[in-house]
Each structure stands twice: as C-alpha cells, then as structure tokens.
Image (cartoon, rainbow, N blue to C red):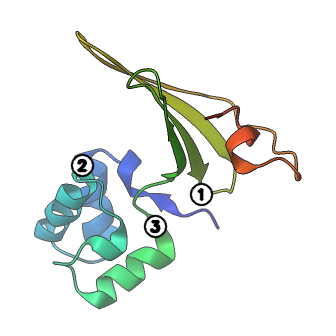
Amino acid sequence: MDKIQLLGMTPEELTRFVVEDLGESKFRAGQIGQWLNRGADIDGMTNLSAALRARLNEIAVANPVRILESYKSKIDETEKFLYALTDGNLIEGVLMRYHHGDTLCVSTQVAWAAPSAPARWRAGCAT
C-alpha cells in the first residue's frame, strides 16, 4: 500500500484527512501543517502524541523526498544533490546561487542505477 503524502495536500485536504480519517481535531491538522511547513518528519512533530505519530507513520509520509548526498563546488556556491524517493528511486538536483537570487533545478527522470556504480555517479552527480 502506498503511503499518503502529507506534504502534497492542500490545507483543506490535510484538515479533512486529519478530522475525517484520523478522528482528530482541526487544531491537530493545524499543528501538522505547521510542522510540514518547517520540513519536519512525522517523528519530529513533538507536540503530537506518540500514539498519533505512530499511526501517522503507518499510513503517511511527511517528506517523500530526502537528501541522500550533496556535493559543493570548489569553484562557486553551486551544490548538487542526490535525492532518494520513498519508492527507492533516485533523482538529482542542482542549486545555483546568483547575486540576483537562487535557482534550484530538479530532474524529472528517475536515474538508472548501475549496481557497481558509486552512489555519487548513479544520478549524474559528481564532485
């Protein structure tokens, strides 16, 4: 069974899920929403009861993407990221910092992972 991705919900969808599916209050939905906006994982939502966190962990995921590795350029402030998805696939991203602002490019294709290739090369990320 695929887990529910909390981060992808609108505030209204999150409230409906928390109230109707979990039987919790709108207040709890607000707390969860605040944690999601801070980038917290379910276990980090410390103002929720341990029982509610355990239940959420069974059926949902807060952050469907996590940074597996990162590489900083020796030349400028560019940083490459290797992201792990909840299904085990990998994607990459590049953060480019400019004087006028930052740009984050994220791949939309899942990388082919050669079993013998080091992780930093699997998605095209190199140091």
Q: Mark 3 touching mark 1, by CB under 8 A?
A: no
Above/below status of 41 relative to 54: above
Q: Secondary structure at mark 3?
A: strand
Q: Measured from the top left, where is residue 48 in percent x and y? A: 21, 79
Q: Is 49 located above or below residue 9 in the figure?
A: below
Task: Kindly identify the amino acid type of the residue bearing the numbered disc 2.
Answer: Glu
Q: Nearer the viewer, mark 2 or mark 1?
A: 1
- Closer to the chain start, of discs 2 and 1, is 2
- Name the residue that disc number 3 marks: 60
Residue 21, position as x, y percentages in the image: 36, 71
Residue at 41 percent of width and 21 percent of height: 76
Residue kind at label 1, given as amino acid type: Thr
Residue marked by disc 2: 12
Query: Label 1: few (<14), some or many (≥20) within 10 Å?
Result: some
Quadrant for the N terminus, please: bottom right
Q: Quadrant of the C terminus?
A: top right
- For this rendering, which residue is in front, 90 or 36? 90
What separation in Å lies between label 2 and label 1 (alpha carbons)?
24 Å
Coordinates of residue 95 in the picture (x, y in percent): 42, 27
Q: Nearer the viewer, residue 44 or 6?
A: 44
Labelled disc at residue 86:
1
